[in-house]
Every structure is written in structure tokens, then in C-alpha cells.
Image (spheres, grey):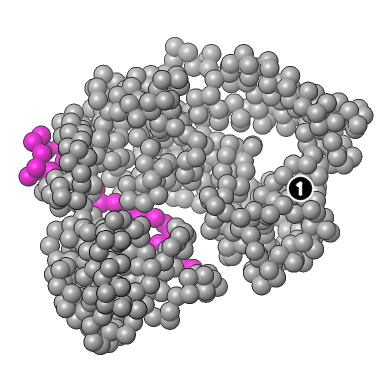
């Protein structure tokens, strides 16, 4: 049987929250209510039940629900609004699912009560909503007001037959008030995304909404209520785009400036007034939205950290497309800009490297940050100050690992970016030394800012979460760990050879994307020598990897070269000893408490493994020193260094 966390967001919900709580008592192993500082009796009602109450200023519907999910104890989530409740049929289905969880998510049919009447026609029925799901495979996304649970690709979903009961509106006046509130939020969201209020959206869309609801969805069978609902849906559609049109008119001829923030988290430390920034900052967000590791992780960690520690800033994300992206934690605090005309959409890579300059200028960006080795050509025409982050120069140091054309293009982009940038961020002193050696530009512009790792690695997980991950991947009681792309430069073969040496009985668990090196080198070696004690994990989720780290005996990372080596930091933060390569950037990241080896000498690696596994006191000492050393890579240190740089550049204009 799985354990189920019921999560509910609330603000002045005294009217309906009790029936919501009563409906879930029989299915919940935990109930979490995230309250936005209600002033009515909502909290008094919650205290009558076994409820975990968290108060959090409203972050927007999507992010408030994700915040609630993050504070649940279990991975299996039932996410409800306070004005919803489970029907008896649906409750029985959920109890059965807990005993035999087969799918990744379950879709509910929502039945709405409108002015005291259950509505079985119009566009309001059946509303199909994912509300029961595994949080390791999905989270709330979409636009605010119209937020939806977005599941990972290739997930299995089942539609349930029982109804999710929803008390929509009690009066027509209440409906009109909500329409006014929600259309304002939607218009602001659409403006940030660059959606335009075309004639089709202003006239045709509302007309279609009425026709669809009243005629196609047989709203006329509901009599007067069906007509009112269909008309209200059409009016809401029109008002949303009318308000969007008004926003664009007000914006014409003015600086875009800072859009009003919809939320500021009360659970984060807010900088003092003299620290709050005013410049408009733009980011190249392609990798943040579409890369699942490496440069994508760096970009997401930085952007998420900035909005956590400096929530009142003005931030714009430039991306060649928006659909299918990885959602950031606080997207309502960003304006998103993407190609608008047909040709820029078709050739969006050219837009990102050249045409985006016009958009940067139009948005009146004060500081533009290229997060991965490049800046758009002609960026100086935008009049923005510029920053580029350089992670490594592997394509220059080890060109044999790249195709000639790729190595050439990467180098040309890097050289251009370094020459035009006002500041060049190197993520390690090793990268700074490489820039000085290999790239001809003003080296006084270089500043070293270490990157941090995801907040997931700093968390302590429940015993049940550890057991769930162990069972899912059938992990042995003790294991060694390697995390990283399985490619020649990462040198996994040395680690595999090391664990075959006498005296090592613990298996090696490997997590990482498989490149050609895996199929051409690793697999033939394993087959030839009949290697049995290496386990390759597939499909590990971001929320599971920290737990896999935390349960390992030690971490082995015999890479030949890195710009930083983020898996090393993840291991230190997770509290496991590290064995890594001598030289390069490795000592910068791994610190004095790690063991350093010649990466191509598997006997040295084997000796280090034996030393750690057979000496508990040494292992304990390495863990303590590693955790202490990792504090210098905290998110707070990183983001303050960036904000100081942004402010300095903006003030120098």
C-alpha cells in the first residue's frame, strides 16, 4: 500500500473547507493545508482535524500548489482546492488505488455546483483534471488561473469514474467578481508571454466559447443556468483579451519596466531595502527551459535562486520557444520573450544568436546574461551591459572529443562573447586559467563565481522516501556511486576496473546518460571480463538522485577534465566521501577532505575505495570535512555575487 499526502491551498475558505477535509480523512495518510493568512475561521476548522498547517503568502495558483506539494511527506499526492470534495464513489476508487497503484496519474471528472445546481452540461462538464499523481513524475504547470498538472513524457494515466465535487459559485455576482479577478491575472500572464490580443481572440474566440458551451456541449438542456454559464464563459474570454489589449496600449512608448509581481514568498529571507535591485535583467533561457542536466541545471539553479533571494527584481527570459519547456519555480516573476513573426519562429536558432538583439533593445534590458558560453551577435546595439558565463574550454583542450565543425563553432562563439562582454564569469579558477591561456581578450573582465547545486541535495529525506527509492531501483544495502555522462572524458572505465580488484565486494552503481563510449568501450569490457558488480540505473528522476547519493558508501569521479564538476559538490552536500582526480579544478570543488588519485590508475582508485570502506573513522571524518567545505558553495553566496555584479554594471551605464 502507498502512503498518500493530501495537499490543499486555502484563503478564507471557511464556507467549504470542512466538507473537503471530511471527504479525504479515509484516504489520507497526511493532510497538508497551505494557508495564505486567512482572516476568517479557516484555520480554526483545520485545527479540528489532524492537519499540518503551513502559512505562506500567495505565490500564484500554480506555484502555491507546487509549494504545497514540496512540503508533503509522501510522493503520492492528492491535490485539491478547498472548495472541492471527493464523492463517495471517487473515495472508494482512491482507497482501491492505494492498495494497488498501477498508473503514474489519475484523472478525475469534476462536477460543478453552480448557484446551488449541479451542472451536467455546458463546457463545465465533464472537466477532466489530474489530481492524484506521483510527484516524482509531475507537478503543477501551465498558466496561473488555468494551471494544470503536467506529467513527464511516457507516463501512464487512467481516468476514474467517480466525481470530484466542486462548489463553483453561489451567486451571479460572485461569478462576475471572479471573472474580473481572474481575467486580470490571465491578461498579465499573457503579456509576460508576449501573447497579442488579435481580432480573432477578441471577437471570434468569445463567440466560439458560447457556441461550444451552449450548443455543442448542450448547455441549453440546463435551461436558464446553461445560458448564463455559456454567456459568462464568452464574456470572460472577451474581457481577458480586452484587458490584455489595454496593457499593451499602456505599454506603448514606455519602458517595459518592472511588471508587478504577483507574489513574494514569506518563507525566504528578503534582502534589506538597500540590497533590492532595480535594473532590468535579461537571461538567455534556452538551456534553463530545455536542457535536463549540466548547463540546464546551472541556468535553472541561478534563475530560481535569484527570484528566491531577490523577488522584487525585474527579470526577462529570452527563449527561442516556450512550448514543452521545463517550468521554473516562480515563473510569474518573469517576463518571457520569444520569436513572434513566422520566419523567426521557423529559424529560431538564428533569432537566438542574432535577431534577439532587437528584442533585448525593445525590452530596455539593463544587463543581459548569456548563461552558456555565448552572446548574440550585435549585442552592443542593444545598449545593454553584458555578462557571459564560461563553464569550461574542453572543446579547446580536448578537441578529439568533438567533431571538427562543432569545436570550431564553439570556439568562435566563445571568443566573440568574451571580447564583447562587460564581465566574463568563470565557474572555477581552472576555467579562468584556461581563458587566460587560450582566449585573447581583456582578462581583467574575468570574475570567478562558483556555482551551487540544487536545493534538493541540501534536504533531509524521510525514511519512507529512502525506502521507496531503494525498492524502486532494487539498490543493494551498500554500494559505490558514479554520476555523470558515460563518455570517454569522464573515464568510467577506470572506476569499473577498480571495483574488480581483490578486497572490494561492494557493487558500483552508475547513473548517467549513455554516449557512444558506453556502447563502444564499456559494454565490450563488461562482456569480455564478465563483470557482475556494476549496476546501471535508467530513468532516475531529479527528486530521487539526492537519495541515491545519500545512501552510497562513497562517490567515485575519475574524470580526466572538468570546468567545475558539479557531481562532486552534490556528493559533498549529500554527506558521502569523495574519490576524484588530482589536478585541474577538482581540488577547488572537492576540498581538503577528499581523496585524490591518478584517474587512469585503477589500482590507486581501488586502494582509495578500500581505505574508506574499511576505516569507519576516516569515512566519518571525510563526510564532516566535506559538508563543512560545501558551505562555501551555498545558493546565497552565489546569488549575492551575481546581484552585486549586475548592480555594478547597471550603475556604470
Q: Is residue 58 visible?
A: no
- Residue visible at 58% across and 36% down in the picture: 143
User: Horizontally, is 260 left or right of 348 in the view?
Assistant: right
On the image, the x and y values in percent for residue 154 come to 54, 52
Determine whether the residue tagged by mark 1 lies in a helix, strand or loop: strand
Residue at point 84%, 36% (across, down): 121
| Residue 71: quadrant of the picture | bottom right
* Few, some or many residues within 10 Å of mark 1 (<14, 14–19, 20+): many
Q: Is residue 617 above or below residue 485?
A: below
* Image quarter of the C terminus: top left
Vertical arrangement, residue 54 with respect to residue 396, above or below: below
Residue on which the image places disc 1: 109
Relative to 219, say whether 142 is above or below. below
Place of residue 474 in the rendered image (x, y in percent of width and height, measured from the top left): 48, 75
The reply, left or right, for residue 21 in relation to residue 637 is right
Give, as a single range, the part of the protein colored magenta.
Answer: 435-461
Amino acid at each position: 500500500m502507498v502512503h498518500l499526502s493530501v495537499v490543499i491551498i486555502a484563503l478564507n475558505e471557511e464556507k467549504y473547507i470542512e466538507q473537503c477535509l471530511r471527504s479525504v480523512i479515509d484516504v489520507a495518510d497526511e493532510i497538508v493545508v497551505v494557508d495564505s493568512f486567512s482572516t476568517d475561521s479557516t484555520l480554526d476548522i483545520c485545527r479540528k482535524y489532524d492537519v499540518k498547517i503551513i502559512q505562506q503568502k500567495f505565490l500564484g495558483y500554480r506555484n502555491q500548489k507546487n509549494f504545497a506539494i514540496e512540503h508533503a511527506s509522501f510522493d503520492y499526492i492528492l491535490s485539491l482546492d478547498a472548495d472541492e470534495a471527493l464523492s463517495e464513489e471517487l473515495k472508494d476508487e482512491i482507497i482501491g488505488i492505494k492498495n494497488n497503484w498501477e498508473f503514474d496519474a489519475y484523472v478525475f471528472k469534476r462536477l460543478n455546483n453552480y448557484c446551488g445546481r449541479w451542472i451536467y452540461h455546458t463546457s463545465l462538464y465533464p472537466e477532466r483534471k489530474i489530481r492524484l499523481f506521483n510527484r516524482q513524475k509531475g507537478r503543477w504547470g501551465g498558466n496561473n488561473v488555468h494551471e494544470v498538472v503536467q506529467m513527464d513524457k511516457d507516463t501512464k494515466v487512467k481516468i476514474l469514474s467517480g466525481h470530484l465535487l466542486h462548489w463553483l459559485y453561489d451567486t451571479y455576482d460572485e461569478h462576475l467578481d471572479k471573472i474580473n479577478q481572474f481575467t486580470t491575472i490571465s491578461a498579465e500572464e499573457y503579456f509576460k508571454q508576449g501573447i497579442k490580443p488579435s481580432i480573432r481572440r477578441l471577437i471570434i474566440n468569445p463567440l466560439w466559447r458560447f457556441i461550444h458551451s451552449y450548443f455543442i456541449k448542450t448547455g441549453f438542456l440546463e435551461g436558464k443556468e446553461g445560458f448564463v454559464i455559456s454567456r459568462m464563459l464568452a464574456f470572460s474570454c472577451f474581457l481577458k483579451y480586452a484587458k490584455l489589449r489595454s496593457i499593451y496600449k499602456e505599454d506603448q512608448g514606455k519602458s517595459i519596466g518592472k511588471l508587478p509581481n504577483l507574489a513574494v514568498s514569506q518563507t525566504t529571507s528578503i534582502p534589506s531595502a538597500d540590497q533590492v535591485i532595480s535594473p532590468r535583467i535579461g537571461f538567455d533561457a534556452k538551456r534553463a527551459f530545455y536542457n535536463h542536466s549540466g548547463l540546464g541545471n546551472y541556468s535553472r539553479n541561478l534563475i530560481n535562486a535569484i527570484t528566491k533571494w531577490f523577488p522584487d527584481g525585474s527579470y526577462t527570459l529570452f527563449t527561442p520557444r516556450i512550448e514543452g519547456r521545463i517550468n521554473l519555480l516562480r515563473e510569474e516573476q518573469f517576463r518571457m520573450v520569444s520569436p513572434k513573426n513566422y520566419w523567426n519562429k521557423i529559424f529560431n536558432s538564428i533569432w537566438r544568436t542574432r535577431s534577439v538583439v532587437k528584442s533585448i533593445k525593445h525590452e530596455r534590458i539593463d544587463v543581459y546574461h548569456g548563461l552558456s558560453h555565448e552572446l548574440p551577435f550585435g549585442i552592443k546595439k542593444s545598449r545593454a551591459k553584458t555578462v557571459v558565463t564560461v563553464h569550461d574550454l574542453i572543446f579547446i583542450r580536448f578537441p578529439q572529443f568533438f567533431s571538427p565543425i562543432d569545436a570550431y563553432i564553439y570556439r568562435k562563439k566563445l571568443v566573440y562573447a568574451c571580447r564583447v562582454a562587460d564581465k566574463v564569469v568563470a565557474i572555477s579558477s581552472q576555467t579562468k586559467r584556461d581563458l587566460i591561456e587560450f582566449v585573447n581578450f581583456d582578462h581583467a573582465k574575468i570574475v570567478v563565481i562558483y556555482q551551487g547545486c540544487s536545493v534538493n541535495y541540501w534536504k533531509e529525506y524521510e525514511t519512507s522516501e529512502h525506502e521507496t527509492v531503494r525498492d524502486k531501483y532494487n539498490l543493494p544495502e551498500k554500494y559505490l556511486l558514479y554520476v555523470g555522462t558515460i563518455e570517454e572524458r569522464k573515464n568510467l572505465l577506470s572506476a569499473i576496473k577498480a571495483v574488480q580488484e581483490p578486497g572490494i565486494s561492494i557493487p558500483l552503481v552508475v547513473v548517467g546518460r549513455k554516449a557512444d563510449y558506453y556502447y563502444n568501450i564499456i559494454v565490450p569490457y563488461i562482456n569480455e571480463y564478465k563483470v557482475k558488480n556494476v549496476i546501471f540505473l535508467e530513468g532516475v528522476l531529479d527528486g530521487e538522485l539526492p537519495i541515491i547519493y545519500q545512501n552510497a558508501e562513497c562517490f567515485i569521479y575519475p574524470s580526466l577534465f572538468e570546468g567545475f564538476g558539479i557531481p562532486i559538490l552534490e556528493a559533498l552536500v549529500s554527506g558521502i566521501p569523495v574519490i576524484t582526480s588530482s589536478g585541474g579544478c577538482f581540488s577547488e570543488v572537492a576540498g581538503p577532505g577528499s581523496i585524490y588519485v591518478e584517474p587512469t590508475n585503477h589500482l590507486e582508485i581501488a586502494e582509495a575505495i578500500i581505505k574508506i570502506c574499511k576505516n569507519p573513522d576516516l569515512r566519518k571524518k571525510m563526510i564532516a570535512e566535506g559538508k563543512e567545505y560545501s558551505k562555501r558553495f551555498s545558493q546565497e553566496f552565489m546569488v549575492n555575487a551575481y546581484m552585486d555584479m549586475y548592480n555594478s554594471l547597471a550603475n556604470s551605464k
